[in-house]
Amino acid sequence: MFFYMYLTEYINGHVHLEESDMCESDGKLFLTEAFSVIMEEILHKGTDSKEKVCEWKDPDQLRALLDLDLREHGESHEQLLQRVQDVARYSVKTCHPRFFNQLFAGVDYHALTGRLLTETLNTSQYTYEVAPVFVLMEEEVLRKLRSLVGWSEGDGIFCPGGSMSNMYAMNIARYWAFPQVKTQGLWATPRMAIFTSQQSHYSMKKAAAFLGIGTDNIFIVQADESGSMIPEDLEAKIMQAKSKDAVPFFVNATAGTTVQGAFDPLNHIADISERNGMWMHIDAAWGGSVLFSKKHKHLVSGIERANSVTWNPHKMLLTGLQCSVILFRDTTNLLMHCHSANATYLFQQDKFYDTSLDTGDKSIQCGRKVDCLKLWLMWKAIGTHGLSERVDKAFALARNTGARSSSHRCATFCYVFRVERHVSWKRCATVCNGFEMRFLLFGGCVRNVGPISGSMYINHAVLKRHLAQWVLVK
Ligand SMILES: Cc1ncc(COP(=O)(O)O)c(C=O)c1O
């Protein structure tokens, strides 16, 4: 009875969970004014090449400027707007034409609209009743991405980033190989062996550690000079694992390595995986987007033979963080079987709609952010054709920029410093840091630095039309 009275009051708007000292109209006014700051400071100035990528400050200076302390009482409207200004001013504008750091860049305004819509609607992707639009949309986007991989059926889910997508793949592969692990844990499994190249992303190590498989059970496969896995060494490492009584169950191939942008030989690796009864995963977080391009999709030839694929549209396609999927060829509902916990308060089977639309139990999360809308809206806006042009352009820019370009590399541009034997890595790092500082002080932002077999690599995702001229001029 009390509950119904409370509910009626609540519905009539008499009970507010929000704090009392800000009325709704003040909140809306603040948002409107803050939005003008966002438009001006980030989307106008932040995309103007005459402005800086970032007003760079040392940590101590920045702490003082930001006045980060959280106090007993709230601040005024004007002070808060100044906070918004400061955040925009001292942050790195990744939408800036001279932001070349990491594997993402730029701004796509349709995707950004999707991101803002997602934040404003603030729902969770788990059930149809709370996210009807997004459950159907996720299903469709995943279907379309799978069809680009070459699968007419299968499964998948949006994950909070490529590292998580890779971890999903490893977990599902382990469940596929040792289904008893879900209930009995690692007690019921033999020593497991994972194979991945020395150029693969570090999330493989994190996943092996997090899942209790252990980083010592990752057998690192050698890569050639271009960064591609050497299949003969994969075979040798499988033999080595077997000789140590470890069971090979998972091989990770990379399509677009993080530093060099190399593609592993997928068909060759698929042959080896099949011969050894292993799950083949492809980490195509960076390179997966070549599937849109008629010109470059040969780089991932054989991708359809994988059991799972990680793909981050938030990198080359510019959807904005975060937008990552893990796709499965499996049609036996492995994802649900492996992760489901059947929480009865959320996933009741006697709802008034088709409960197979409640896909939340496939996830290891409970609440899950909507990540499909930004990609869907951007795709609607420019079509598959526009996305393919975007990928081709990124490759063309990388090739035009020149250095170390190669026909089997992703849209990555590398400066390569050959290091003399007597020069220490510390000295190399100093040179690279100096290089980065120069860019920063000139208002640019670059680099991913990695030492690879006697060379120091500084790489960029070349997604900007300005890069070619700019690097030459400075
Ligand atoms: C090849 C590759 N895989 C996975 C990841 C991790 O993706 P995320 O940063 O979304 O976790 C990256 C990130 O750079 C990557 O380059």
Image (cartoon, rainbow, N blue to C red):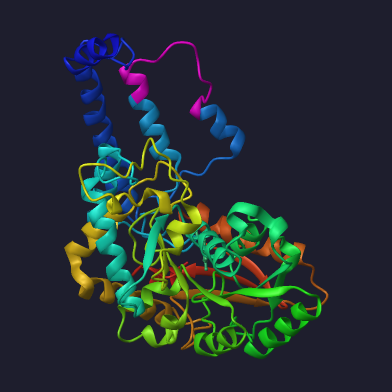
- Foreground of the two, 246 or 197: 246
Location of the N terminus by quadrant is top left
Q: Tell me how many marks there are.
A: 0
**Residue 471 placement (x, y as % from top left):** 46, 70
Q: Quadrant of residue 146?
A: bottom left
Q: Quadrant of residue 217?
A: bottom right
**Residue 262 placement (x, y as % from top left):** 53, 80
Spot the residue most to the right.
422
**Which residue is depicted at the point 45% across and 60% down?**
335
**Residue 53 placement (x, y as % from top left):** 42, 51
Would you say residue 419 sits in the magenta stretch? no
Q: Is 352 displayed left or right of 416 in the figure?
A: left
The reply to whether residue 198 is visible in this rendering is no
Would you say residue 70 sits in the magenta stretch? yes
Q: Is residue 216 above or below residue 349?
A: below
Q: Main secondary structure of the magenta part?
A: loop
Q: Is residue 473 above or below residue 83?
A: below
Give the residues in magenta. 66-80
Q: Is 342 displayed left or right of 35 in the figure?
A: right
**Which residue is depicted at the point 49% across and 53% down?**
339
**Residue 64 placement (x, y as % from top left):** 55, 27
The reply to whether residue 371 is visible in this rendering is yes
- Foreground of the two, 45 or 206: 206
Q: Is residue 124 above or below residue 16?
A: below
- Foreground of the two, 20 or 94: 20
- Foreground of the two, 147 or 451: 147
Q: Is 411 displayed left or right of 15 in the figure?
A: right
Q: Is residue 11 above or below residue 407?
A: above
**Which residue is depicted at the point 31% across and 49% down?**
358
